[in-house]
Amino acid sequence: MHPAFSVIFFTVASGAGFGLFSLLFIADTFKLGGGFESLQIVLGGIMALALIVLGLLSSTFHLANPKNAWRAFSRFRTSWLSREGVFAVVFMPLALIYLAAVWFDAPVWLRELSGLLSAVMAWITIFSTGMIYGCLKTIRQWNSPLVPANYLALGYATGSLLLLLGAVIAGLDTLPYIALSALIVSVAAVLKAIYYFWIHSPGLGPTINTATGLTRAKVKLLDTGHTHGTFLTQEFGFVIARQKAGFLKVIVFILGFILPGLMMFWIFGQQGGAVAAMVAVIAGLAGTAVERWLFFAEARHVVNLYHGAQRC
């Protein structure tokens, strides 16, 4: 599939925003590292909402006619894209109520209830984003529970790195935040490794033989029916060299997982380290962006079987 920058930015930014908001609520509830002050929670929540809103707005640039984006809300019963939009909209007022409850020192029950509902809606929204791709049977590399699992893990991993940066800046005890971030980043790394192994497993996915139903001999397409590239070959026939894909996967693990892990050790040893925390955030976001580019670039739509491909 042809990677679209607007969708890459959307999934990375919104995932980090939803992850940050959910983890911020957890940190506030259990007063991790001594607990953030009210102003710090509100500023962190505003940052999370900014990432979410910017991500959602960027997703509309992928549409041929962005002003019709509202139509995505009309198919809630059958479309994960519609569900994602509805859940994101429901999340917003709940998140604002939580931040207002923190700022105005509202009763604990209102603060905890609105925060819990916001965190749940954030989780559901990221899951829905992953299911937009995970439900597509026409793309083998996406049609797996590993896809929404990876979206959730990477969203919370980048959110945890942002939360760790906030804890360092606020002067809190960073040990609980390092432990939380290390756990989530490790889970995300394992899930990503499993996904990369799975998509390259032999014998999976449709072939030109299974598509035609002629399985007794090797079938080969003799004529594609066109002499020039089409919309289908441009959008669904994107090809990336195996060596390039392998190199980029190494970059994903170095930037997305290894470098943030090294920065956590630095922060733990120095009992601070705002620069190290900032490097961890930038590396994590950059690694996730590369991962998301590869997610699209390595996807092979079944329509390629009718344009010369032997296997998808």
Image (tube, grey):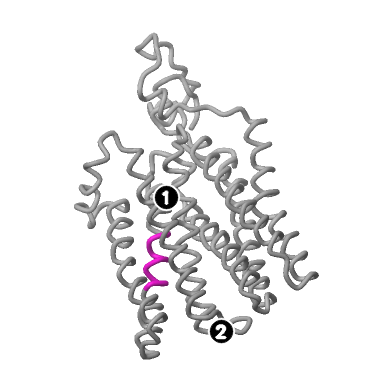
Dominant secondary-structure state across the stretch colored magenta = helix
Mark 2 Cα within 10 Å, few/some/many (few <14, many 20+)? few
**Looking at the picture, which amino acid does disc 2 mark?**
Lys
Vertical relation: 144 (above or below) 33: above
Residue position for label 1: 134
Q: Position of residue 100 (x, y in %)?
A: 36, 77
Q: Is 123 a magenta residue?
A: yes
Q: Is 255 a magenta residue?
A: no
Q: Position of residue 196 (x, y in %)?
A: 60, 46
Q: Which one is in front, 85 or 196? A: 85
Separation of marks 1 and 2 at Cα, in angstroms = 36 Å
Q: Which residues are magenta?
A: 118-126
Mark 1 Cα within 10 Å, few/some/many (few <14, many 20+)? many
Residue position for label 2: 31
User: Quick check: marks 1 and 2 in contact, CB under 8 Å?
Assistant: no
Nearer the camera: disc 1 or disc 2? 2
Residue drawn at (48%, 80%) of the image: 38
Q: Which one is in front, 246 or 71? A: 71
Q: Secondary structure at mark 2?
A: loop
Q: Secondary structure at mark 1?
A: helix
Q: Which one is in front, 302 or 153? A: 153
Q: Which one is in front, 31 or 82? A: 31
Q: Position of residue 162 (x, y in %)?
A: 57, 63
Residue drawn at (24%, 53%) of the image: 78
Looking at the image, the residue that sits furthest to the top is: 227
Total number of numbered discs in the rendering: 2
Vertical relation: 5 (above or below) 117: above
Vertical relation: 97 (above or below) 74: below
